[in-house]
């Protein structure tokens, strides 16, 4: 019985050692891929970093709480520009560890991930938290100043953009005002022209009426003169007839006396 028990324990130890060797094998393979990718200084070999990520994940499936392997995985994610994932992984590492140096290191890398993802406020906060855990870290201080300068430049640029936007808006408003003034002036001139045309038409109508009246008056005067002339002619004719009649009568009387 004791022999069996000892054999069982020995087999368990062997199995555990084999299990641990498999984990380390994944980590070693992941490290090989990572180092191979780092050798190329010309370009970022994301394929090799991706292979390293896969191997680290295999190891973490068997030992998920290992801080070093989690750190390696976070680094591999960062090198692939998976900044959102790497920031979450570094934050998780910082939350899990009680070692100030390791916490500061994880927060520093978290700040880098946020910075690369253009999340300046979050990166500044991470760097400050990292310095609270390790105030002597010069690299973190440098990155903090760099991020703060970027933030200031961003704010200055936003201010300039807003000023330009306000200036453009004012220019547009001034243009609209000028257009309105021009339109009002055109409308005013148009109204004045209408009024002038009305006055001209009115004057023209009055002139036409006056001309018509003058023409009518002229015609009436001519008619009157013609009628007067006709009356005079008629009266002359009548007088001539009367004279003839009187002459005939006188002639008739003279004949009777001769008899």
Image (cartoon, rainbow, N blue to C red):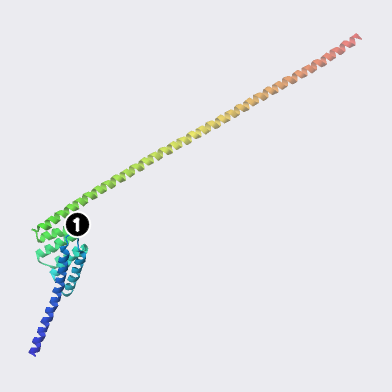
Q: Is residue 62 above or below residue 113?
A: below
Q: Position of residue 250 (x, y in %)?
A: 84, 12
- Residue 87 visible? The answer is no
Q: Nearer the viewer, residue 46 or 172?
A: 46
Q: Position of residue 189 (x, y in %)?
A: 43, 36
**Horizontal arrangement in the rendering, residue 197 relative to residue 243 (left or right):** left
The structure residue drawn at horizontal position 9% and vertical position 66%, both measured from the top left corner, is: 99
Q: Is residue 46 above or below residue 59?
A: above
Residue 59 lies in what quarter of the image? bottom left
Q: Nearer the viewer, residue 178 or 23?
A: 23
Reading the image, the residue beneath label 1 is 121
Q: Nearer the viewer, residue 191 or 102?
A: 102
Q: Quadrant of the N terminus?
A: bottom left
The structure residue drawn at horizontal position 90% and vertical position 11%, both measured from the top left corner, is: 256
- Residue 191 visible? The answer is yes
Disc 1 crowd rating (10 Å Cα; few below 14, some 14-19, many 20+) is some
Could you tell me how many numbered marks the image carries? 1
Q: Is residue 119 above or below residue 181?
A: below
Q: Position of residue 244 (x, y in %)?
A: 81, 16
Return the residue found at the far right: 259
Q: Is residue 160 above or below residue 195?
A: below
Q: Quadrant of the C terminus?
A: top right
Residue 113 lies in what quarter of the image? bottom left
Q: Nearer the viewer, residue 223 or 85?
A: 85
Q: Position of residue 43 (x, y in %)?
A: 19, 60
């Amino acid at each position: 019985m004791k022999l069996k028990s000892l054999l069982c324990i020995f087999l368990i130890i062997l199995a555990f050692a084999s299990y641990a060797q498999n984990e380390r094998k994944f980590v070693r393979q992941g490290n090989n891929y990572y180092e191979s990718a780092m050798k190329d200084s010309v370009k970022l070999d994301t394929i090799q970093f991706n292979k390293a990520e896969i191997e680290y994940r295999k190891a973490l499936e068997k030992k998920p709480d290992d801080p070093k392997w989690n750190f390696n995985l976070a680094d591999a994610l960062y090198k692939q520009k998976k900044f959102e994932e790497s920031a979450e992984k570094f934050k998780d590492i910082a939350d899990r560890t009680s070692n100030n140096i390791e916490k500061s290191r994880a927060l520093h890398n978290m700040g880098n991930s946020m910075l690369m993802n253009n999340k300046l406020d979050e990166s500044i906060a991470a760097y400050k938290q990292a310095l609270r855990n390790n105030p002597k870290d010069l690299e973190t201080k440098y990155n903090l100043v760099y991020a703060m300068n970027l933030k200031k430049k961003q704010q200055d640029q936003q201010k300039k953009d807003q000023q330009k936007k306000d200036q453009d808006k004012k220019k547009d408003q001034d243009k609209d005002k000028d257009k309105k003034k021009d339109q009002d002036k055109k409308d005013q001139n148009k109204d004045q022209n209408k009024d002038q045309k009305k006055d001209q038409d009115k004057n023209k109508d009055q002139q036409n009426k006056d001309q018509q009246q003058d023409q009518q008056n002229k015609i009436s005067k001519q008619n009157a003169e013609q009628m007067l002339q006709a009356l005079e002619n008629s009266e002359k004719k009548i007088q001539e007839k009367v004279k003839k009649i009187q002459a005939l009568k006188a002639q008739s009387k003279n004949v009777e006396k001769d008899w």
